[in-house]
Image (spheres, rainbow, N blue to C red):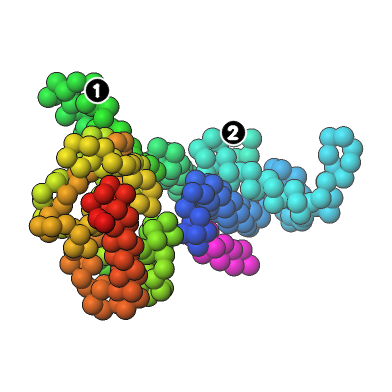
């Protein structure tokens, strides 16, 4: 009965599954093995008890000897192996009982240990029924473990299959299909699709902000506009950022459009143009689209065009979010003013070198 304490092992295994999901296959296999051994041990104990109480198979196996005249059966004190060495009786009776339990549970049934008495046969029938059911369950669990994917992985594969099927039905070119698949591979590099909106919606506000800071910590470290802010402000900024994905040659911003926010490059590169003239390439950590928001355009509209040069991941911060940060977070307001001053100084320097300012 002390083996019931091993039930704690299942709690430990479940905790390890939550902490180390990548080890799920190993932990589940160990759980199934542990279950098989425990159930087999309990069955072998009952099988031994039935054999002793009915003077059945234990006599046949030489564990007990019976007096033909009196009919009394007693347990032997020692057993001899075929090589002449002495066998431990207690271990032999346990391993023999466990051997029968395992061969019956797994539906192998070699037949070298058989039920002799009615009580043994009745018990054997029950174990055969239980064994066939448990064997089918174990087989199903192992099959599911080896073949099933998580919901997140299944969503990704379903999306890729949908793209391929759509491309086939619509007779799209192989080049266009490859571009679409490459876009999703870039957007979901781990080949898992998470419903982040649903995950975030159920979390408390503070945890959402801390989680956002963890997710966008690389942007905070790379972007000077965010790195200088205090911890509370960085949490608020990250909670307002929105991930945007662009395929090569996709237009991100256009000239003469009303600005709705600024962009920070997270991965990839973005080419910046002004009146069809290439200006520079924005890389990870660079900001673009902020000039009009800073008030550095004459008509309040964008003066530059931005195009993704490769599969690119961007972080978008809307104009409303920027106003909220300026009004409610002094740390951001200070950094924003400093950023504006640097921009004006840079523009003055460019104008001076071109002779526009004396």
Q: Residues within 10 Å of mark 1 (few under 14, many from 20)?
A: few
Q: Secondary structure at mark 2?
A: loop
The circle on residue 110 is 2
For the stretch drawn in magenta, what is the main secondary structure?
helix
Residue drawn where x is 23% and y is 27% of the image: 177
Residue 238 lies in quadrant: bottom left
Residue 314 visible from this viewpoint: no
Residues rendered magenta in the picture: 1-14
Residue 248 lies in quadrant: top left
Q: Nearer the viewer, residue 227 or 59?
A: 227
Residue drawn where x is 83% and y is 46% of the image: 87
Image vertical order of residue 335 relative to residue 178, above or below: below
Residue drawn where x is 25% and y is 73% of the image: 326
Image vertical order of residue 2 relative to residue 25, above or below: below
Residue 155 image offset from top left, x and y in percent: 28, 43
Q: Nearer the viewer, residue 96 or 243?
A: 243
Residue drawn where x is 84% and y is 35% of the image: 82
- Whether residue 280 sits left or right of residue 34 in the image: it is left
- Whether residue 41 sits left or right of residue 199 in the image: it is right
Q: Nearer the viewer, residue 121 or 350?
A: 350
Residue 179 image offset from top left, x and y in percent: 26, 30
Task: Determine the CA span between mark 2 and mark 1.
Answer: 61 Å
Asked whether the residues under the numbered discs 2 and 1 touch, taking CB atoms below 8 Å apart as contact, a structural biologist would say no
Q: Secondary structure at mark 1?
A: helix
- Whether residue 102 sits left or right of residue 159 in the image: it is right
Residue 57 in magenta? Answer: no
Residue 100 image offset from top left, x and y in percent: 61, 43
Residue 5 lies in quadrant: bottom right
Residue 235 image offset from top left, x and y in percent: 36, 70
Report which residue position mark 1 lands on: 175
Q: Earlier in the sequence, mark 2 or mark 1?
A: 2
Question: Split into 4 quadrants, where in the image is the N terminus?
Answer: bottom right
């Amino acid at each position: 009965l002390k083996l019931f304490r091993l039930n704690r092992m299942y709690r430990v295994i479940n905790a390890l599954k939550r902490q180390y999901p990548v080890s799920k296959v190993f932990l589940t296999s160990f759980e199934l093995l542990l279950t098989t051994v425990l159930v087999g041990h309990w069955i072998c104990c009952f099988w031994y008890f039935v054999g002793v109480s009915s003077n059945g198979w234990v006599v046949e196996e030489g564990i007990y000897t019976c007096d033909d005249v009196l009919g009394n059966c007693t347990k032997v004190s020692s057993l001899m192996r075929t090589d002449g060495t002495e066998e431990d009786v207690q271990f032999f009776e346990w391993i023999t009982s466990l051997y029968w339990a395992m061969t019956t549970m797994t539906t192998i049934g070699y037949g070298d240990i058989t039920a002799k008495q009615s009580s043994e046969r009745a018990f054997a029938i029950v174990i055969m029924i239980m064994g066939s059911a448990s064997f089918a369950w174990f087989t199903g669990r192992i099959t599911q473990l080896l073949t099933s994917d998580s919901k997140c992985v299944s969503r990704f594969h379903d999306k890729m299959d949908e793209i391929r099927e759509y491309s086939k039905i619509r007779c799209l070119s192989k080049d266009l299909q490859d571009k679409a698949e490459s876009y999703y591979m870039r957007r979901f590099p781990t080949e898992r699709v998470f419903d982040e909106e649903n995950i975030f919606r159920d979390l408390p506000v503070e945890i959402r902000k801390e989680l956002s800071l963890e997710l966008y910590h690389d942007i905070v470290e790379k972007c000077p506009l965010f790195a200088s802010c205090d911890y509370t402000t960085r949490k608020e900024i990250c909670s307002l950022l929105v991930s945007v994905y662009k395929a090569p040659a996709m237009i991100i911003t256009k000239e003469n459009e009303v600005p709705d926010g600024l962009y920070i490059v997270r991965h990839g590169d973005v080419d910046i143009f002004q009146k069809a003239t290439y200006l520079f390439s924005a890389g990870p950590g660079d900001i673009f689209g902020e000039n009009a928001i800073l008030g550095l355009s004459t008509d309040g509209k964008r003066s530059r065009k931005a195009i993704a040069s490769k599969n690119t991941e961007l972080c978008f911060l809307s104009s409303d979010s920027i106003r909220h940060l300026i009004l409610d977070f002094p740390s951001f307001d200070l950094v924003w003013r400093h950023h504006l001053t640097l921009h004006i100084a840079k523009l003055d320097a460019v104008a001076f070198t071109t002779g526009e300012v004396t």
